[in-house]
């Protein structure tokens, strides 16, 4: 359908033309007009009289969300008049993109994500950058990490601003800096290998540079300074220099310095809140403080400091309600961060995302929290393709406008912006959802990761899965993925990758169990069949590596891919080396396979919930061997 855009300002006209073309509409001198009317509240109203449409809202992204709602309804209603009314539950609605876990998202992918944010009514994007922005005076900061140039960040900021999406730098000014502190030249800055030395003049000078250059490219006056998970604060070099000091006082000293520098730069400060809780907790946990706890030692926090309560874990709103009340003892300036669970392994955990996000955001709405974000971390090397975040991002967007994410509405958004349905996306979630996980994968089990990476002969998870039929499970998943045929979807490459992953897991998931059983029965015919299966699996593993490489270079800068190359290549090499060991046994060159003589153990047994058979296997380095993969 063709529309006249002459009643829009130049910026809206340009962006509306782009959005219309993506949805196969056009624009010209027709008598069918699109019009914008500003209003003062958070509502979005779309009024269509069968010919012209008027979109009324208070924000630029509200207009673009209204435009997409209009196009969704138009596809079914045609020239029949209709009205749509929505109201945002939150004033600030952001996505946080992790650019620091080896995968430094490339400029094109970030722009694509910003465009989807604008279309869905998300008005902020936080770029989480530990050491991946340029500090001209320090060539070691971000060396070989794909750091963004000043001009790249300015370009992204301008792109976002044009669409009404505020870009906000999110950095670290205390912990989570191990990739920078690895360099010998930074030794004087280290408290521990991950935490900066508080009270040091050099540390203060570094942080002044970090804050200045992180904020310089952006038009916003907000900055997120991190300061989370500094568990060993004051217990490394600081302890040797100063003796034991009250750790909340160390934290306060450092915060005062960071805050002062931000004020010098005329910045509004956001920081993660967890250290105020961990330093009060006898266990060092974030979420286990009683409701009557006091924070008297923190009663001098700056009034305009915004605390960000992050919680991606709890499946019960009461937990969020309690923690929001505790946070209000510290500050009335509160943000909430839910999570998109792209960091659990090879595939996204959408089940846990949906449950935790819904419970958390409804708690925010009930407790008057108006500023929310959804984080997309990529822990342990960014194994999950970044584009899988789109399902959770659009689920989050829906919950920003409604207390329930209705299936039919979510489907409209997913089909419109990705070309896929929710049912299609949920196939990715099935990689970690076989029988034996808890409801909504509450434990965040990640069997697809540990079954891919564990060794063929020294499989430390074989004892966990030896009574299961996971090869059959992944065969059924492969068939479901094989049915997906999309002609015009930005997810096509992702589906091809996951189909190949399922194909590998058909062979790999129960391989160690089958090898051990055949070996102990001395069934050499079965061992011969399995070694041939391993050869085929190695070929598939190489194909999987190539598919993942293609996705990486479409989503990220080159730096960091070498880690996945090593990991995927390691699976391939261990398959080939294991074949050589089996061949030697079959030929009689060796009289036993000591690796298969070892008795299996369960990696982690849930004694409280016997129906819970799987486990969360942790990081790659905990999966590939019981030997020491790194360190001394």
Image (tube, grey):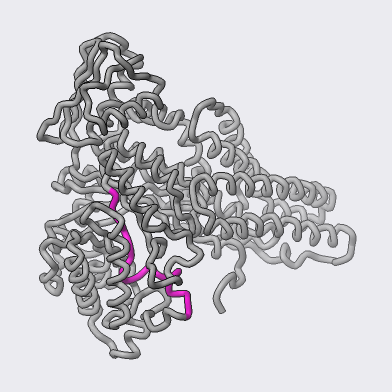
Q: Is residue 176 magenta?
A: yes
Nearer to the camera, 630 or 608 = 630
168 is within the stretch colored magenta: yes
Q: Is residue 70 above or below residue 266?
A: above
From this viewpoint, is residue 613 visible?
Answer: no
Which residue is at 66% across, 56% downward?
569
Name above or below for residue 79 compared with residue 70: above
Q: Position of residue 517 (x, y in %)?
A: 73, 54
- Tell me the quadrant of the picture where the N terminus can be found: top left
Name the foreground residue: 265 vs 47.
265
Q: Position of residue 406 (x, y in %)?
A: 31, 29
Q: Which portion, as a residue range, is magenta?
A: 167-184
Relative to 396, is 227 above or below? below
State the image coordinates of residue 606 (x, y, percent, origin top left): 46, 57
Seen at 18% across and 32% down, the residue is 87
Quarter of the image for residue 159 reads top left
- For the point 34% across and 82% down, which residue is it? 235
In which quadrant is the C terminus drawn? bottom right
Position of residue 612 measured from the top left corner of the image (x, y, whole percent): 47, 50
């Amino acid at each position: 359908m063709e529309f006249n855009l002459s009643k829009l300002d130049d910026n809206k006209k340009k962006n509306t033309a782009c959005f219309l073309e993506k949805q196969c509409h056009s624009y010209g001198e027709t008598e069918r007009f699109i019009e914008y009317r500003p209003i003062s509240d958070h509502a979005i109203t779309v009024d269509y009289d069968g010919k012209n449409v008027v979109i009324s809202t208070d924000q630029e992204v509200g207009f673009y969300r209204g435009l997409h709602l209009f196009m969704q309804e138009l596809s079914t209603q045609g020239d029949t008049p209709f009205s749509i009314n929505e109201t945002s539950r939150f004033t600030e609605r952001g996505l946080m993109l992790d650019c620091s876990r080896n995968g430094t998202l490339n400029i094109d992918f970030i722009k694509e994500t910003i465009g989807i944010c604008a279309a869905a009514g998300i008005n902020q994007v936080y770029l989480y950058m530990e050491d991946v922005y340029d500090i001209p005076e320090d060539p070691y900061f971000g060396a070989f990490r794909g750091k963004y140039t000043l001009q790249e960040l300015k370009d992204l900021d301008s792109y976002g601003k044009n669409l009404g999406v505020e870009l906000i730098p999110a950095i670290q000014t205390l912990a989570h800096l191990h990739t920078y502190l690895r360099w010998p030249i930074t030794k004087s800055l280290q408290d521990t290998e991950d935490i900066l030395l508080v009270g040091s003049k050099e540390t203060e000078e570094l942080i002044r540079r970090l804050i200045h250059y992180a904020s310089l490219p952006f038009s916003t006056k907000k900055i997120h300074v991190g300061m989370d998970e500094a568990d060993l604060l004051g217990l490394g070099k600081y302890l040797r220099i100063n003796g034991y000091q009250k750790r909340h006082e160390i934290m306060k000293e450092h915060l005062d310095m960071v805050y002062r520098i931000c004020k010098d730069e005329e910045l509004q400060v956001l920081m993660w809140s967890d250290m105020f809780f961990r330093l009060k907790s006898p266990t060092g946990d974030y979420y286990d403080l009683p409701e009557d706890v006091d924070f008297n030692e923190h009663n001098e926090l700056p009034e305009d400091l915004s605390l960000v309560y992050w919680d991606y874990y709890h499946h019960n709103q009461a937990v969020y309600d309690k923690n929001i009340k505790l946070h209000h003892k510290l500050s009335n300036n509160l943000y909430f961060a839910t999570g998109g669970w792209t960091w659990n392994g090879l595939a996204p955990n959408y089940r846990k995302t949906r449950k935790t996000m819904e419970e958390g955001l409804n708690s925010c709405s009930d407790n008057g929290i108006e500023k929310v974000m959804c984080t997309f971390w990529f822990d342990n090397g960014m194994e999950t393709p970044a584009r899988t975040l789109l399902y959770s991002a659009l689920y989050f967007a829906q919950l920003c406008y409604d207390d329930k994410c209705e299936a039919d509405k979510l489907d409209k958004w997913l089909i419109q912006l990705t070309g896929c349905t929710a049912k299609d996306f949920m196939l990715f979630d099935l990689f970690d959802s076989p029988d034996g996980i808890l409801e909504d994968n509450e434990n965040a089990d990640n069997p697809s990761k540990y079954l891919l990476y564990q060794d063929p002969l020294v499989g430390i998870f074989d004892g966990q899965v030896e009574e299961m039929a996971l090869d059959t499970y992944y065969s059924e998943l492969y068939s479901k993925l094989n049915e997906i045929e999309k002609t015009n979807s930005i997810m096509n490459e992702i589906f091809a990758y996951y189909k190949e992953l399922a194909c590998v897991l058909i062979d790999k998931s129960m391989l160690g169990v089958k090898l051990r059983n055949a070996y102990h029965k001395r069934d050499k015919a079965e061992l011969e069949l399995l070694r041939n299966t391993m050869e085929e699996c190695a070929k598939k593993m190489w194909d999987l590596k190539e598919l993942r490489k293609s996705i990486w270079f479409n989503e990220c800068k080159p730096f960091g891919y070498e880690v996945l190359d090593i990991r995927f290549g390691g699976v391939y090499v261990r398959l080939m080396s294991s074949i050589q060991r089996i061949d030697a046994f079959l030929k009689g060159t060796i009289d036993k396979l000591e690796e298969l003589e070892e008795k299996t153990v369960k990696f982690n047994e849930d004694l409280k919930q016997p129906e819970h058979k799987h486990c969360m296997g942790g990081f790659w380095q905990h999966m590939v061997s019981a030997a020491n993969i790194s360190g001394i």
